[in-house]
Amino acid sequence: MDMVASLTARDLNKLYENPFICEAILRSLPPLAKKYVFQMLYIDGAIPAKTMEEWVLPDGFTKHKVAIDRLVQLRLFSEEKKKETTYRLNSTFQSNLQKHLINGGALPREPMPSGITARLPTLEDLEAYAIGQWECFLLQLISSAQAERPTNFSSSMMKVFQRGLLIQRDKEAPRLTESGFQFLRIYLQFPGVASDILFSGFSASKFLRVPVFDSLERGINQADLISFLLELSFHVAGEAYNLNTLSEIQRSMIKDFADLGLVKLQQGRKESWFIPTKLATNLSMSLTDSSARKEGFVVVETNFRMYAYSTSKLHCEILRLFSKIEYQLPNLIVGAITKESLYNAFENGITAEQIISFLQQNAHPRVADRIPSVPENVCDQIRLWESDLNRVEMTPAHYYEEFPSRDVFEAACDYARDRSGLLWEDSKKMRLVVNAEIHMHMREFLRGQNK
């Protein structure tokens, strides 16, 4: 919804022309914001802000402010400030939500008759397909040499993912970044809601609004992309839908969605169809839904040995990011957490807390209920090894000495200090060190002082 809020007013109005999008937006709102929408749904005029404040008790004013801010951010409310502040419900959203509530229950498109479609996959087969596509895609992303089968993922989509998740250094293979590791960690923790993070990269603390593929390069409007993604969540998983019911823009996107496991494409004698998977229909599911968590597979011992009960090559490659893999059996990966393996991870921007969190959240059921699930000495040592690297911070700098007078020295110190570039000073011997960023400005300043 942050991505929706970033759209222009014109694109948002275009989005609100779709009744299903209106329902999806309504579902995303805080409870109090939903109440305000329904209260104003059949009011054509504007409502004074003071009147709306009377709708809540005094102790609910904070929630009231959050609700109003969200509604204004999504342009569901237009704010008018003349003699007094008033709010008016977006007319496009209002009319389409009214129609949707009255007509309700309809699907974006009707499934194809069973007599036309060939044998459809079961829900279990669809889930296996979706997870398989995702894992193959991620494996291709972090280690193309380990990909289980040749892939034909679109180059534009791969480039955008790589842009946010990988870093390319001179004459070195691409390495996973901190954001990339966070992306993989959350995917492994919540595979059933992978679509929630489908078009998101990660910073250290929160999602970044980044589309799956560069929609502008492909000539696809972001509103169309978001609209189609949200509309997919109203389809029924496992049902077949005719590709001819899609617009030209939607057909250009469906191939990428199939690559990522959102839908499965099938070809019949005369017709072609797509089958949504749970990754598509779970778009509105919360990442905190514990029922979507995947059973863990990692056991860490006090001697830093690590055993991962998994047959996945993707799991092996992720563990290799911060541990030394010693050998791999058909259903068991054996490795060790070493100082060298962790230093490699830290150099790539992966933090100690991310590694510990990954081990805890993916702990095998036999150890997951223990407190702690990962031995304390292992967690403490990972943090200590990280702190070893952070004891010294390197900053490019320039050193100045032999000032002609104390006045010039003090003026130079004040100049550097005002620009937050003074790193060190020795007033007795008139020496100072400044950040390299202000070096050129400092030279010009000193030339002026000497004149």
Image (cartoon, rainbow, N blue to C red):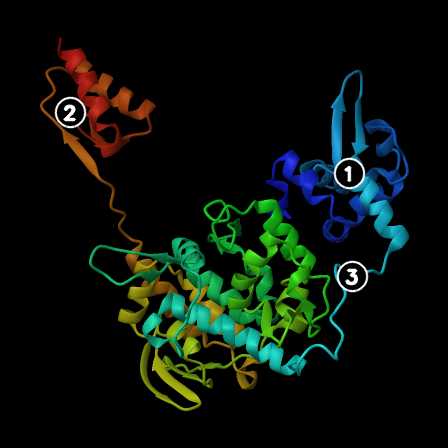
Q: Quadrant of residue 250 in the image?
A: bottom right
- Name the residue carrying label 3: 107
Query: Horizontally, is 103 left or right of 369 in the view?
Result: right
- Name the residue located 75 percent from the left edge and 48 percent from the top edge: 22
Question: Is 119 drawn above or below residue 210 in the view shown?
Answer: below
Coordinates of residue 442 in the picture (x, y in percent): 21, 22
Badge 1 amino acid = Thr
What residue is shown with label 1? 92
Residue 328 image point, x, y percent: 36, 87
- Real-space Cα distance between discs 1 and 3? 20 Å
Which residue type does callout 3 highlight?
A: Leu
Which numbered disc, 1 or 3, marks the residue that appears first in the sequence? Answer: 1
Mark 2 residue element: loop
Q: Hey, what amino acid is under mark 2? A: Met
- Classify mark 1: helix, strand or loop: helix
Residue at left offset 22%, top offset 30%: 425
Residue 265 at what x, y percent from top left? Answer: 58, 71
Count of numbered marks:
3
What separation in Å lies between label 2 and label 3 (alpha carbons)? 77 Å
Please name the residue shown 21% across and 28% down the image: 439
The tag earlier along the polypeptide, 2 or 3, is: 3
Q: Residue 430 carries which label?
A: 2
Query: Which is closer to the viewer, label 2 or label 3?
Result: 3
Residue at image point 69% right, 68% down: 241
Residue 234 visible in the displayed image: yes
